[in-house]
Structure formats: C-alpha cells, structure tokens
Amino acid sequence: MAPSQETPLKSTTDSLHLELMSHCLQLTFNCIPSPTAFNVGSIVFLPSSSPFFEHLIHHFQAFPNNTISDPTGLILGEGWSRQIPGNTHAEANALANLRTRWEHLLDGHDDAKHHFPALKDVLKDSVCYATMEPCSVRTSGGPSCALELVQSHVQAVFLGVEEPPDYVQCEGVRILQDGGVNVIRVVGLEEQCLEAARRGRGD
C-alpha cells in the first residue's frame, strides 16, 4: 500500500507557542555539534487547562517561571540532540527524561503511587514542541521520534521548521498525522531553528 499523503499543516503565530519554541531553541545550545546530525531542542508540555495540572504543579517547572503571571502550563520533560549518550534525538530524550523523572517521583513513595495520575493519561493531555520536524528514520536503529510520539499518544506536536533533506528525506509529519497526532507549525522562528540545527557543521 502506498503511503498516505500529508495533510496541509496548520500554523500558529500565538505568542505562547512562540515563547515555548524559543525555550526549545535555547536548549539547542546544549547540543554537542555533529557533522552528521542536526541540533534540535524539544519539550513535553502540559497545558494548565489539563485536569492533571494541579496534581503536578509542585513537581515540575511552571512556564513561564516567574511571579508576574500565572503559569500557562508545566514543562514535564526537556531534551536536546545527543543529550543522552549515543546518537540520541531531542524528542525521544524529552520523553525519556520525563519517564525517568516520573519513576523518581514514585520511587519509594506509596502515597504518590495512589495520588499521582498515570503517566500515560498525562501524556494524552500533553503536547510536544520541537525546533525541527521529528525524525521518521533512525539511521542508528530504533524507533523514530515521530513513532515514539505517536505511541505516547500526545495530543499535538508543534514544530519550528520541517526537516531539510540534508541527510534523509523526512516523513515525520506524515507519520504523526497518520497516527492521529495534530501537527502545527509555529510561524516566526524558522530561520533561527534552521540556523540552530546546522550550528557547528562548518559548511
């Protein structure tokens, strides 16, 4: 069967989405540059509209993290390219870091196990932000970031820019859409996301 066609992307210029994408851009500065891979930053974000927000507000970073305005949500996990040893990717690392944090919160605390919501339910209320389209192929093996996000059942993925064909032809958007995940382009930071992705390559 031939692969399905991508649905045209929705887009947004909303200031909150731009602020969260800017946060992801800052994470790219943590990436160790590679001549054969992009620098990407990503977060898993739980909006304050979620019924799980009040349960988790004392355990995760509020955004924005200030005393001037009420938080719009919680940053549940942060990730960037090659953060975890190996040729690891930002979105997968954000999910892995969230799962590690969750296990730490529950470890040895029977009360927390009874009062904490299930992570799978929290992920269904969460969204992912990434400076670049999640990968559709892992040249080093393993599931793609797009597939991991589908399997995590996040509501939506907000991306800063589609992946250019520098290394492979990416079909991350199609995989996400086929998996029932909304994909939205955050308009306004495309050049910065591409510049960050290629930082340190020397070409």
Image (cartoon, grey):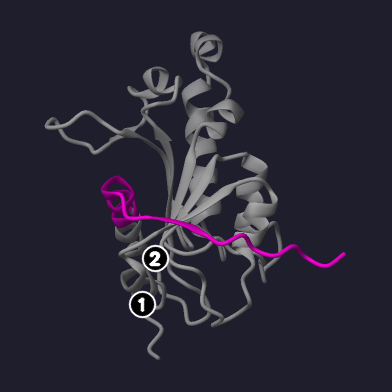
- The span picked out in magenta is 1-23
Q: What is the x, y in percent for residue 39?
A: 43, 69
Q: Residues within 10 Å of mark 2 (few under 14, many from 20)?
A: many
Q: Residue at 36% of width from left, 63% of height from top?
A: 28
Query: Magenta span has 157?
Result: no
Q: Which mark is residue 31?
A: 2
Q: What is the x, y in percent for residue 20?
A: 32, 49
Left-right relation of 72 to 184: left
Confirm or deny contact between disc 2 and disc 1 (CB under 8 A). Answer: yes
- Residue closest to the eye, 145 or 153: 153
Q: According to the image, label 1 marks what residue?
A: 199
Q: What is the x, y in percent for residue 10?
A: 48, 56
Q: What is the x, y in percent for residue 81?
A: 47, 62
What is the spatial separation of the Cα atoms under label 2 and label 1, in whole angstroms?
9 Å
Left-right relation of 125 to 2: left
Secondary-structure class at tag 1: loop
Kind of residue at disc 2: Cys
Kind of residue at disc 1: Arg
Left-right relation of 62 to 10: left
Secondary-structure class at tag 2: loop
